[in-house]
Image (spheres, grey):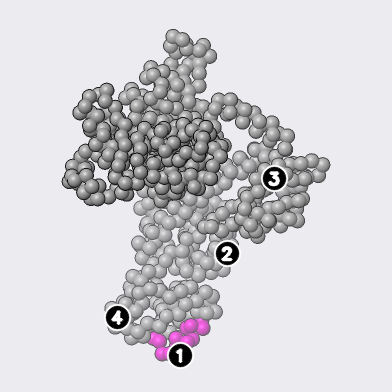
Amino acid sequence: MNETKNNIPEKVNLALISTYPELAGVFSAVAERENLNPFIAIAALEEAAAIAREIEPHTDAILSRGGTADYIRRVVDIPVISIPITPFDAARSVNAGKHLTDVFAFFNYGQNMYGIRDIEKMFGKTIREYTFTTEQEIEAGVKDAKACGVGVLIGGIVTVRLARKHGLEGILIECGEEAVYRSMLEAIHVVGIRRTERSRAARFEAVLNSIVDGVIVTDADNRVTIYNPAAERIFRIAAERVIGRQVTEVIPNTRMHKVLETGEPELAALQKIYDGTIATKRMPIRLDDKTIGVVSTFEDVTKIQQLEQAIRKQIYDKGFVARHRFDDILTASETMVSLKELAALYATTDSSVLIEGESGTGKELFAQSIHNASRRADGPFVAINCAAIPEHLLESELFGYEGGAFTGARKEGKQGLFELAHNGTIFLDEIGEIPKSLQARLLRVLQEREIRRVGGDKVLPVDIRIISATNKKLEQKVATGEFRGDLYYRLNVFGLKIPPLRDRLEDIVLLGVAFLKRLNVPADYGALGKKLAPVLTAYHWPGNIRELINVMERFSLLLNRRDNNPDPAEMLLQVMPLTSAGGGDEIALMVRVDKGLKSAVQDAERAIMETLLARYGHDRETVAKKLGIGKTTLWRKARP
């Protein structure tokens, strides 16, 4: 929509139906200043409503005042904006009549006005307030005011007329220029919104009429509000016989009313209809935690099965499927529980997510869970390790290429991973390793949601959500210029920092036992976990969960071969690279010496400190005392 310098949409047809001529004059002056040419009429109540009906077909909005505005609203479907009477307007009227009386009666439509008591103090007058919604109520108020000895009445044109009829003085309260101007801007704003909504409604109706699925929507009273042409064909009932009626009266075997009652969706339900079967999806429509209606879609079962099989085959053949969900992330750590809740919240958006954490902490597990909890769950999940693909191939893998773009390229070209992730999620692991030459192109994808193949000149739109992961400190890379700052902030709209396994001791035994169960190791898992706990929690697990899985696989082989029931903890020690000799202060170390004595000593010191920190809940003061060193020395030597 084109707009003027004052953000006023062009060709907005406004009308003022005023109860007194002076308001029309103010309105004309404001309209002329804003380059508008409105329709203006002088009328009140029923007469104003009649004029409104006549001008409605060629008018976008009507401005009026008080009860007259209410009368107009009852007879037209276009926006009607009330020009308010402000306390300043009331004060101006009292000032005009202050020499006439000490007692005023103020008549206001619908409700009392704020500020009247302040006006009393300002002028040293008494003001009795009367509210009304009908002319009869005004006359009753005028009679009451006269009986109470009120000298002057302040109100609209009807109030002034009735005051004079009963022999009282009446002062017409007039709206100021600011109130008129603000009401005009409000009317223009409402017109703009209404035009936008009507445009959306037209597009929505066009979509409903074009899709092959039948669609029925009901409201909170189980009445049908939407019923598209495809539904007419499926149910063989014309829309005019369905819209506005109870859904149970017109749709055979429906359960939409049940979904409204329970608030629970019914997915992939089969519904008998005439001589066939249709697949039905019934979803509650929720607003502010209340079910306000139900939407149902219908399609021929055979077509759905064929389409689903084709889609699933295509996705699974390419391997673009997320297999994990949040329930697969086992944890007893409050930190991890909070991270799962935060990630589930992120899944409700389409914004980029950056997952930070050491190798083996489960970053892809979180990425897949976010995808499967999002609206994109039925779309592809495409994962790529940016560090595993040579730099000269990474660009063509991500963006694809046109035939003959370079030596060895397929003549028919190739889709890139961004294209394959369309309507789904792409997971860029080790994003910190992406070369500087590709960072600008990735930034463009994030900003414009479009890609161009290598060697191509066509711009292809893509609807994707980007989740990235790194085990590097990207902020440091940004500071050193190795990673673009603008790209970092685009990737890190939402962030997750997964703690290493050594920082969540309560998860080590839980996960270790879970991996043994997965390997079908016969055991009393509760008792086994208690025996293994001292050994497992004494190790600092530099390889995190991935290393724990490897250790448990080696341990499971020993458990399956054990003779004479040896101590499981002793067996575990045989496959642990670093372990504690028990619950005391003895620690057994295995360090590399191929890098020299100095490096081996540093590794040993760090391992000792990390093990004791884990054992004593990261209480640095206690660990420093145990080792006979200062906390500063402990902090410096324990850093990686």
Q: Few, some or many C-alpha atoms within 10 Å of disc 2 (few <14, some 14-19, many ≥20)?
A: few
Marks 2 and 1, how far apart in space? Answer: 34 Å
Give the residues in magenta.
Answer: 139-153
Is label 4 or label 3 in front?
3
Q: Measured along the vertical axis of the image, is residue 209 above or below residue 85?
A: above
Q: Measured along the vertical axis of the image, is residue 338 above or below residue 315?
A: below
Three-letter amino acid code of the residue under disc 4: Lys
Disc nearer the start of the sequence (4/2): 2
Disc nearer the start of the sequence (4/3): 4
Is 318 inside the magenta-drawn segment?
no
Three-letter amino acid code of the residue under disc 3: Ala
Per the picture, the main secondary structure of the magenta-coloured stretch is helix
Marks 4 and 3, how far apart in space? Answer: 70 Å
Disc nearer the start of the sequence (1/4): 4
At which x and y percent is residue 507?
42, 45
Considering the numbered disc 3 on the image, is that residue within a helix, a strand or a loop?
strand
The residue under the point 67% across, 40% down is 213
Is label 2 or label 3 in front?
3
| Residue matched to label 2 | 74
At which x and y percent is residue 112?
43, 75
The residue under the point 31% across, 49% down is 616
Query: Toward which corner of the image does residue 455 lie, by quadrant?
Result: top left
At which x and y percent is residue 533?
41, 45
| Residue matched to label 3 | 269
Image mark for residue 121: 4
Residue most toward the front?
A: 564
Q: Are marks 4 and 3 in contact (CB under 8 Å)?
A: no
Three-letter amino acid code of the residue under disc 1: Ala
| Residue matched to label 1 | 147
